[in-house]
Image (cartoon, coloured by chain):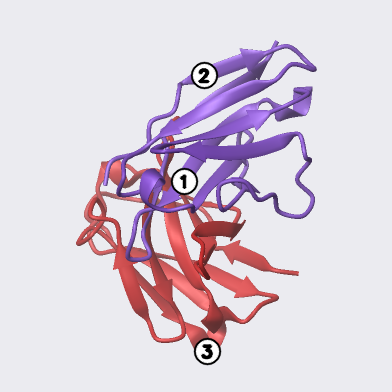
Amino acid sequence: EVQLVQSGAEVKKPGESLKISCKGSGYSFTSYWIGWVRQMPGKGLEWMGIIYPGDSDTRYSPSFQGQVTISADKSISTAYLQWSSLKASDTAMYYCARHVYDSSGYCDYWGQGTLVTVSS
Amino acid sequence: QSALTQPRSVSGSPGQSVTISCTGTSSDVGGYNYVSWYQQHPGKAPKLMIYDVSKRPSGVPDRFSGSKSGNTASLTISGLQAEDEADYYCCSYAGSYTLVFGTGTKVTVL
């Protein structure tokens, strides 16, 4: 059974750094792209970017390029999303999702979400 | 990369059909047959309902169907049921392994 399990909720202050995680199981972690989707409170889904754990190839949405860093540790089947200096506007639910790109382009499995709250 | 445009809300009575539109450009929806749709209930993670414009993953009822014409994709829910009340998002491949989501549509079952 394919599963993506994300790290727990975080409460941080503006300016702090943060790294959240997404652990994949039940499939070959290095054979699928895995990415992150933001959902701000009461708002829609926004695609942030992806990484291919097999070779660490990374792609970002122009809206998020330079704002976050996506990485992965294939030895423990885990992808990460990190910020170096959080802002209040980073408050949101963040979902990881397995991406399928074999003559296609969609997210077939999703994590349960990680709520990030940034407040002074 | 702008968000795809969806109506804010649609509604229908049980048993009726509703259709949600998703309008993009020739760089996303119009350029690829890689449109997917996701259902999201409050407080839950999104769930894949349609991929590659019209394909249904295993376990998704055949009441859900997808289509595309030019730069606009559509999701139709036939035989509307109470459990279909949720937010729905379209998503399109936009080249170079990037995706773009729609603005989202709230489906209300009257």
Return the residue at label 1: B91
> Under tag 2, what secondary structure?
strand
Image vertical order of residue B97 relative to residue B67, above or below:
below
Disc 3 to disc 2, C-alpha distance:
44 Å
Q: Amino acid at mark 2?
A: Ser
Labels 3 and 2 touching (C-beta < 8 A): no
Q: Position of residue B104 (x, y in %)?
A: 47, 32
Q: Few, some or many C-alpha atoms within 10 Å of disc 3 (few <14, some 14-19, many ≥20)? A: few
> Under tag 3, what secondary structure?
helix
Nearer to the camera, A17 or A43: A43
Q: Which mark is residue A75?
A: 3
Give the residue at the far bottom of this rendering. A75
Disc 1 to disc 3, C-alpha distance:
31 Å
Side of B56 relative to B107 (left or right): right
Disc 1 to disc 2, C-alpha distance:
17 Å
Q: Residue at x 78, y 15 (%)?
A: B14
Image vertical order of residue A71 relative to residue B89, above or below:
below
Q: What is the chain identity of the residue bearing mark 2?
A: B
Q: Is residue A99 visible?
A: yes
Q: Amino acid at mark 3?
A: Ser
Quarter in which the C terminus of chain A is drawn = top left
Check if mark 1 and mark 3 are on a common chain.
no
Answer with the quarter of the image where residue A50 lies.
bottom left
The hue of chain A in the figure is red
The chain drawn in purple is: B
Return the residue at label 2: B9
Q: Amino acid at mark 1?
A: Cys
Q: Residue at x 54, y 27 (%)?
A: B20
